[in-house]
Image (cartoon, rainbow, N blue to C red):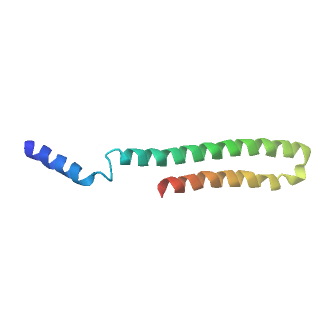
Amino acid sequence: KKGRQKMASMLVAESFGEACPASAPFFGYMGAAAALIFANLGAAYGTAKSGVGICSMGVMHPGLIMKSIIPVVMAGGVGIYGFFFALF
């Protein structure tokens, strides 16, 4: 059993050095998670605000509803962009 522990500690020591501390994967994954979370929160907020705009546009100018759908598509694009940013 001690041999396994020694081998495991050697593998950990080899994969992490001075240039790559042991906390590097944690901060990398937290950065990817933050990018994904904040991008999708922004997309949800943008979709909600543009939904309110579509509703008011339907009341005031019913003929221009199709033009007001563009911000919803753009807000969805922000969420997709955040997903790709978190992956790569």
Residue 53, given in percent of the width and then of the height, sits at 80, 44
Residue 44 image-quadrant placement: top right
Please give the name of the residue rendered at 20% of the width and 52% of the height, measured from the top-left corner. 11
Against 2, residue 16 (above or below) is below
Please give the name of the residue rendered at 32% of the width and 53% of the height, measured from the top-left corner. 19
Residue 78, given in percent of the width and then of the height, sits at 63, 52
Is 80 placed left or right of 21 in the picture? right
Residue 52 image-quadrant placement: top right
In front of the other: 76 or 10: 10
Is 53 placed left or right of 30 in the picture? right
In front of the other: 79 or 10: 10
Q: Can residue 66 be seen here?
A: no
Residue 35, given in percent of the width and then of the height, sits at 53, 48
Please give the name of the residue rendered at 56% of the width and 52% of the height, measured from the top-left corner. 82
Is 72 placed left or right of 15 in the picture? right
Is 43 placed left or right of 55 in the picture? left
Quadrant placement of the N terminus = top left
Please give the name of the residue rendered at 48% of the width and 45% of the height, measured from the top-left corner. 33
Tally the marks: 0
**Residue at far front of view:** 18
Residue 62, given in percent of the width and then of the height, sits at 89, 49
Q: Can residue 46 be seen here?
A: yes
